[in-house]
Amino acid sequence: TIFCPFFVALISLSTLLVSLLYKTAVYTFAVLVLGAIEGVWEQYHANHTLGSAITLFLETRNVNRFLGIVLSIGVVFLIHNIFHEMELILGKGSVKRLFLETPKPNRP
């Protein structure tokens, strides 16, 4: 019974983390799919056949650069989701006040 509040806090924190990571993974996967569709679409307009468009897309795409861009966008989504959850927990406008407003001096 001593550890019960600790486990409740741990479970609520883990559900928040799972929610953040799930949203970020879904958004990042969407960026990955849309980036691949965009690349195939460009090759399709150049060749006018879908089979050669897919082949050329896979042969000419710099995979490291593509995955780097997707990873970078995924990190941006993660940061966005963290601030969105902070806004939900702390109240509307609290994140803006936390980061953008200058602190008022304490006068006795």
Image (cartoon, rainbow, N blue to C red):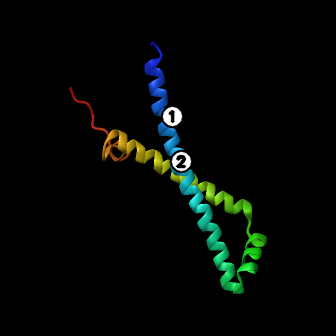
Sequence-wise, which precedes: disc 2 or disc 1? 1
Name of the residue lying farthest toward the left: 108
Pinpoint residue 104: horizontal percent, then vertical percent. Answer: 27, 37
Vertical side of 67 occupied by 14: above or below: above
Pinpoint residue 108: horizontal percent, then vertical percent. Answer: 20, 26
Left or right: 57, with 98 as reference point: right
Q: Quadrant of the N terminus?
A: top left
Vertical side of 15 occupied by 73: above or below: below
**What amino acid is at disc 2?**
Tyr
Pinpoint residue 63: horizontal percent, then vertical percent. Answer: 73, 62
Label 2 vs label 1: CA separation? 12 Å
Residue identified by numbered label 1: 14
Identified at 73% across, 74% down, the residue is 54
**What amino acid is at disc 1?**
Ser
State which quadrant residue 87 falls in.
top left
- The residue nearer to you, when weighing 85 against 14, is 14
Residue identified by numbered label 2: 22
Pinpoint residue 12: horizontal percent, then vertical percent. Answer: 45, 32
Around disc 2, counting alpha carbons within 10 Å, would you say few (fewer than 14), some (14 to 19), or many (20 or more)? few
Q: Secondary structure at mark 1?
A: helix
How many tags in the picture? 2
Identified at 45% across, 12% down, the residue is 2
Name of the residue lying farthest toward the front: 1
